């Protein structure tokens, strides 16, 4: 056994230094303070909170068993939802690609275009699909067009931002080589940039299509077409069992979409 | 014929990287440019096809001034200058054939480039050159599936597809093992004589420079301090160029980190 | 002899075409045909009310005209709305993140026995499949209008995201550290604390920051269906055709989101 000499006894060890402990304490304290403030200030009727589990259970029992009578209407609406998601994703590509080109630091012609590109992408991303839908329903009236436009306007920001990042991450050297051959800008992009961002492009579009399917299910709640319209209608008439069926259909759609997209992604990579 | 007169390149307000270089390269010679890292070899080469903008001076290729060209004129001038890169600079996801045909991008239309419908003469030339350097059987293989030496050969063919009036090579063998490196140097030397092409090679392997080139130009700190035949390139010349600096590995291949010693 | 330039030789005249992206021609043209047919079919079958759509442009002009300049007059209302949204997002993130830890541990293949694993994964899938707006509607139907529904919704939303990523991280941990703790004789919970948590907590903090930002955005939206926050204020403005007020709210929403994104990005950089 190793002899324990005097110089090793009594030495303190703590996990955190003094400074670290102060920082951690401050963070905990601030968070606790924020929590207490939020709970006290928020407009919640506390008796309802304790009642919530019962209420939720109550709603759940009203939704059982699911009612399949409106099945064909539901299927049609689901199809419409898929169409909204697919069409808008397809159309978005044509807008998002040029925007991503000017929003990427290494391909944008000048600072002004860079700011314009970034501005478009940020505005598109910061406004939720549903809010876009509200706007377009107000303009074009309730229906599928509002839905398609809403999804498009939101997707431009998503695809544009990720594609812009993909463009910024390319290897510059093939681009340099293409310029050295005397090719024009467009040909340099075609041979030097496009082949490098193709895998990212497919992955991004497939991912967004998956997300758009989910988003499209709720557009109908503000009138922009798809299964949401049926859902809102059923809720308004307290047809909870139909609601349950619709929810089931939505889960199946989402799961199918995820399965399909992960299979596609494997094919592409 | 390439004529460089009083070429100066300065970045911002720093010391100039190239300090008034003069160089004349006549047709059909293979000229190697040697010097330590930072001596300005790469910068000088890239000034010729304007991948780097010269600050002042003149560069004339067969009588045509290069320095003030812009837009379409610049692109047309670049067509006539072929470049081979240290990192090969291939488009990895495209096939060897597409990489080679990319050398013609300065000559074909956008539609042809987009649809890959290059003229048959270009395709003939491509097959001929690929066969000459020994990679014709790789035509439809992805560029990143080839070995280093094979990739550099693709790079050489691409440059030659431009029907250039001069070939520039920026340390073409620095990323290759010694044996492959010799093969590439042999290739460059024979192609130069077959095609009557002037070739300018940046190289830091001094023994390869002596063996495969007709003339050696030595740069140090942006100035030319040696210009002569391999026979004249003796120990004294070597010291003048690398003096105070550890000369690179004579067996070639890897880039040694060289500490730049500024002569006091 | 300029052999190289003329291109003459045994291979002259050999044709070349780019090997197509999709090898089988049936698949390639089939896909193209399918896309064209799909576009034609959907545009014909989807219900477009062209008359109403034609009214769109003049309507848009009126709306944008009415929206300019944005009206910040009812600042009180906006402030209450935003405060509530923030409270909802904050509490939901806290609750969601706390619950995510046990759920993620349950949903990790390398840690949990099969029935518990399935339960954990099931909870996560359920939380993810529904858009928060749908979940919000259901909670509103169950517990009434107001921020309670919002908090419940976003908690579920947080769990769906954070627990999933955390579970993946747990499945990727270095097993050796677990073995070492077990070999030293530590029980299940002590092993967790010393071997698992140190590996996953940094990720957890990053995820929490991301989720706070995400919840802030989402809280603006669940209000549209009555779950509290600035969303309800926005909905009311739209409903009353108060487009200048709505525009003001929208601008502020975008501003808050940008600020929050900036802050969360900065915090994540600091602790990564």
Image (tube, coloured by chain):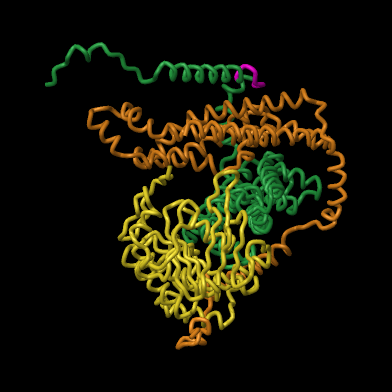
Specify the quadrant of the image occupied by residue A194: bottom right
Answer yes or no: is residue B30 visible.
yes
Left or right of A234, for residue B52: left
List the single residue furthest toward the left: A1
Q: Within the magenta stretch, is there residue A26?
A: no
Query: Which residue is pictured at 54% across the width and 58% down the height?
Result: B21
Residue C81, percent from left and from top: 71, 27
Q: Relative to A55, is C113 above or below? A: below
Nearer to the camera, C193 or C206 = C206
What residue do we see at 45% from left, 35% from top?
Answer: C203
Visible residue check, residue A84: no
Residue B54 image offset from top left, x and y in percent: 60, 56
Depicted B43 relative to depicted C15: above or below:
above
- The colour one sees for chain B in the rendered image is yellow
User: Where does residue B230 sit, x and y in percent of width and height?
Assistant: 37, 67
B88 left or right of A235 in image: left
- Which sits in the foreground, A9 or C191? A9
Magenta residues? Answer: A39-44
User: At 62% from the left edge and 74% from the top edge, which residue is drawn?
Assistant: B107
Rendering colour (chain C): orange
Q: Say which colour chain A has.
A: green
Q: From what the image shows, is residue C205 above or below residue B262?
A: above
């Amino acid at each position: 056994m190793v002899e324990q000499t005097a110089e090793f006894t009594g030495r303190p060890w703590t996990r955190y230094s003094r400074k670290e402990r102060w920082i951690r304490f401050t963070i905990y304290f601030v968070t606790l303070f924020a929590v207490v403030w939020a709970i006290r200030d928020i407009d919640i009727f506390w008796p309802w909170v304790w009642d919530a589990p019962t209420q939720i259970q109550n709603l759940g029992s009203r939704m059982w068993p699911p009612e399949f009578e409106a099945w064909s209407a539901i299927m049609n609406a689901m199809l419409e939802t898929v169409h909204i998601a697919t069409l808008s994703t397809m159309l978005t590509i044509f807008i998002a690609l040029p925007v991503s080109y000017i929003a990427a630091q290494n391909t944008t012609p000048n600072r002004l275009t860079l700011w314009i590109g970034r501005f478009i992408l940020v505005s598109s991303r910061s406004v939720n699909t549903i809010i876009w839908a509200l706007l377009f329903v107000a303009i074009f009236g309730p229906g599928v067009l509002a839905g398609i436009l809403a999804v498009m306007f939101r997707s431009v920001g998503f695809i544009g931002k990720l594609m812009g990042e993909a463009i910024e991450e390319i290897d510059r050297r093939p681009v340099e080589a293409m310029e050295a051959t005397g090719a024009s800008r467009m040909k340099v992009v075609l041979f030097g940039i496009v082949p490098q961002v193709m895998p990212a492009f497919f992955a991004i579009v497939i991912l967004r299509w998956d997300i758009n399917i989910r988003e499209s299910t709720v557009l109908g709640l503000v009138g922009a077409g798809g299964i949401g319209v049926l859902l809102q209608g059923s809720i308004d008439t307290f047809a909870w069992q139909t609601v349950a069926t619709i929810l089931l259909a939505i889960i199946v759609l989402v799961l199918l979409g995820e399965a399909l997209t992960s299979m596609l992604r494997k094919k592409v990579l | 014929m390439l004529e460089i007169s009083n070429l100066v390149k300065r970045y911002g307000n720093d010391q100039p990287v190239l300090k008034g270089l003069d160089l004349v390269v006549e047709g059909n010679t293979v000229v190697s440019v040697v010097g330590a890292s930072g001596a300005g070899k790469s910068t000088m080469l890239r000034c010729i096809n304007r991948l780097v903008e010269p600050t002042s001076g003149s560069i004339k290729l067969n009588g045509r001034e290069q320095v003030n060209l812009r837009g379409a004129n610049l692109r047309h001038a670049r067509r006539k200058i072929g470049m081979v890169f240290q990192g090969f600079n291939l488009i990895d996801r495209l096939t060897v054939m597409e990489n080679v045909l990319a050398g013609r991008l300065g000559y074909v239309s956008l539609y042809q480039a987009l649809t890959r419908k290059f003229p048959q003469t270009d395709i003939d030339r491509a097959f001929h050159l690929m066969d000459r350097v020994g990679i014709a059987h790789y035509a439809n293989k992805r560029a990143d599936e080839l070995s280093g030496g094979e990739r550099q050969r693709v790079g050489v063919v691409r440059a030659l597809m431009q029907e250039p009036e001069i070939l520039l090579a920026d340390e073409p063998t620095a990323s290759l093992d010694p044996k492959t490196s010799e093969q590439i140097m042999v290739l460059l030397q024979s192609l130069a004589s077959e095609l009557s092409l002037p070739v300018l090679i940046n190289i830091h392997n001094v023994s390869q420079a002596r063996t495969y080139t007709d003339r050696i130009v030595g740069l140090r700190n942006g100035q030319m301090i040696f210009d002569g035949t391999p026979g004249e390139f003796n120990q004294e010349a070597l010291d003048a160029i690398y003096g105070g600096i550890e000369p690179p590995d004579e067996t070639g291949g890897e880039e040694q980190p060289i500490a730049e010693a500024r002569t006091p | 002899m300029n052999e190289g330039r003329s291109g003459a030789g045994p291979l002259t005249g050999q044709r070349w075409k780019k090997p197509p992206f999709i090898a089988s021609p049936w698949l390639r043209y089939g896909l193209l045909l399918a896309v064209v047919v799909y576009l034609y079919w959907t545009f014909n079958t989807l219900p477009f009310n062209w008359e109403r759509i034609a009214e769109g442009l003049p309507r848009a002009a009126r709306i944008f005209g009415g929206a300019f300049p944005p009206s910040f007059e009812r600042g009180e209302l906006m402030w209450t709305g935003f405060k509530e949204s923030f409270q909802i997002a904050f509490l939901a993130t806290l609750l969601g993140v706390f619950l995510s830890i046990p759920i993620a541990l349950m949903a990790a293949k390398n840690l949990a026995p099969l029935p518990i694993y399935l339960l954990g994964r099931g909870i996560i899938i359920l939380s993810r499949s529904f858009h928060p707006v749908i979940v919000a509607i259901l909670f509103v139907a169950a517990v009434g209008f107001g921020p309670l529904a919002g908090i419940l919704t976003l908690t579920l939303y947080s769990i769906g995201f954070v627990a999933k990523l955390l579970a993946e991280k747990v499945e990727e941990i270095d097993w050796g550290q677990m073995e070492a703790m077990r070999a030293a004789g530590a029980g299940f919970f002590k092993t967790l604390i010393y071997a698992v948590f140190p590996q996953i907590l940094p990720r957890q903090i990053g995820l929490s920051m991301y989720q706070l930002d995400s919840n802030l955005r989402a809280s603006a939206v669940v209000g549209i269906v009555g779950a509290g926050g600035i969303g309800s204020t926005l909905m009311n403005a739209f409903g009353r055709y108060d487009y200048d007020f709505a525009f003001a709210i929208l601008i502020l929403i975008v501003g808050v989101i940008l600020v929050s994104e900036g802050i969360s990005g900065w915090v994540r950089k600091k602790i990564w």
